Amino acid sequence: MGTTVLAVTLALVASACTAGVDGGAGGQGAAGGVVGSSSAQKEVRLAIGGESEDGYDPTLGWGRYGSPLFQSTLLKRDADLKIVNDLATKHTVSPDGLVWTVDIRTDAKFSDGTPVTAADAAYTFSTASKSGGLSDVTGLSQAVAVDNDTVELRLKRPQSTFVNRLISLGIVPKHAHGKEYARKPIGSGPFKLVRWDEGQQLIVQRNDSYYGTKPAFERIVFTFTGEDASLAAAKAGQVSMAAVPSSLAKTSVPKMRLVPVKSVDNRGLMFPYQPDTGKKTAAGLPIGNNVTSDKAIRQAINQVVDRQALVDGVLEGYGSPATGPVDGMPWFEPSSAIQGNDAGKAKELLESAGWKDSNGVRERAGVKAAFTLLYPAGDTTRQGLALAVADMVKPVGIQITTKGVSWDVIDKRLHADAVLFGWGSQDPTELYNLYSSGSAGVGYWNPGYYTNPIVQKNLDAAMSATDQDEATKYWKAAQRDADGNGFGPSGDAAWAWLVNLQHTYYVSDCLDIGKPQIEPHGHGWPITAGITGWRWTC
């Protein structure tokens, strides 16, 4: 065990003592659920990452990839991803899709004891729409509390995906929402924040005024550790759950079981779509790449990559091949996918486009088929995928130089260099943002500046549809339509999507976490979506 890992593990042990965890006399510490230990029944310790450096304010984006924990949402998804009520008792949508009316339960209270009202819901949506945060409520025109328990959400235009805002946006109290809220949140969710030692731990306590199923635990301690340190803490019996990358999921951990959870969390290679003409963003960042802007290069990479080998080799089998950002979701178009891998087809594409072999690396008009692929340093999964893809494309004459760098570097180069990104959402809005020309260069949305008028037309039609089945038809057409147009790998191949992850957790043999949801991208704590149903069994 390295010095750093040992130090972190010892810190966790000390933290457990100061937090009042009773190690008991029966072997495993309280974090693992000691038989007969009352403290074990009251507290659970988790090392599952997900610290929100920006705090826990839903109007700024907290909770968009999972349960907001401290706040309630109007709607939520159950273990089967079906939409069910949370704060809402019912909701309706006007025939023109412009007005969403939501009735709110009258027995909900914030953790400071004040009732949750329609005015709070209206305030939350209005604030989120103006905050410029990541919760994407920009389609809202006005939120109005019709009466004490009815809110109308009026849109600027129909938006088929707006239901997901009702699922992901936690309701904040109008009377207690200010500058300090993100670090001292008040909500009507199952837990309330007690203490946050940034970079180390977050302690939350059961909200006994919560209207839903009361959690079995009085307190949860989230410890913020790296991958190796989380595993070390699990081995030491100091946490009840540890999230680990698939590369560490073959380790044997005493008194714990491995729980792989399916997800729509994917990893893909984003290609700069525009040629390098010297154009720059308003901030002076370069746009374009003369290699990845060629469709033949992008299609060839999509053809030659052996995605199953990536799952088996890099993910240790904990995942599945990905050929798009929404594989397996209701709006996925299977005909857009590439099945298997075909180096011969990749070579044909390159030859036909004029890329000729020259000492192992193809060239065309003096330009080598070579480019840089960036990935965030310290992410072992993305590093493994990047190196493997570079090896896979080499035999067909494409040279990829992989570089692990900071996000600051990626932020400056993401329009000109390929980047190994991770996405994945239960909301098709993400599909729109990744491929809409209107999103080009906005944060991490469409960093390659992809554009296709036919695809854009289908994306816009999907977004503005008032019927979900109609929307799904257009989402699928954007990936591949009847004429073969689309952003998918068999069309423009704007990305080379590689794998869908399974999130892997070591869980105490004494902790029953029920049936986990299919999880979105791993920001936040998606595993905690069903936390009110978790129970000790020892």
Image (cartoon, rainbow, N blue to C red):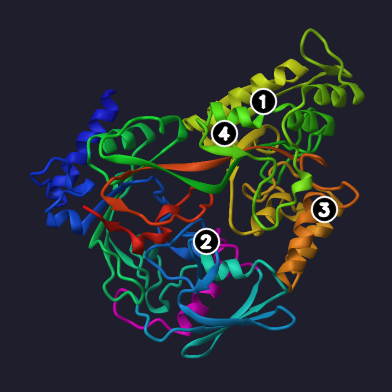
Judging depth in this view, the residue of 238 and 456 nearest the camera is: 238
Sequence-wise first label, 2 or 3: 2
User: Viewer-proximal residue, 534 or 461?
Assistant: 534
Instruction: Kindly indicate whether the residue at mark 1 contacts the one at mark 2 (C-beta within 8 angstroms).
Output: no
Please identify the quarter of the rendering in which residue 210 is found: bottom left
- Viewed as shown, does residue 476 lie left or right of 530? right
| Mark 2 neighbour density, 10 Å: few (under 14) some (14–19) many (20 or more) | few
Location of mark 3 (residue): 455
Q: Which secondary structure lies at badge 2?
A: loop
Mark 1 or mark 4: name the one nearer the start of the chain. 1
Magenta region, residue range: 111-138
Q: Residues within 10 Å of mark 1 (few under 14, many from 20)?
A: some
Residue under label 2, please give it: 80
Mark 4, residue position: 409
Frontmost of labels 3 and 1 is: 3
Asked if the residue at tag 2 contacts the one at tag 4, i.e. Cβ–Cβ closer than 8 Å, the answer is no
Task: Identify the secondary structure beneath mark 3.
Answer: helix
User: What's the distance in space between the residues labelled 2 and 1, CA to CA?
Assistant: 40 Å
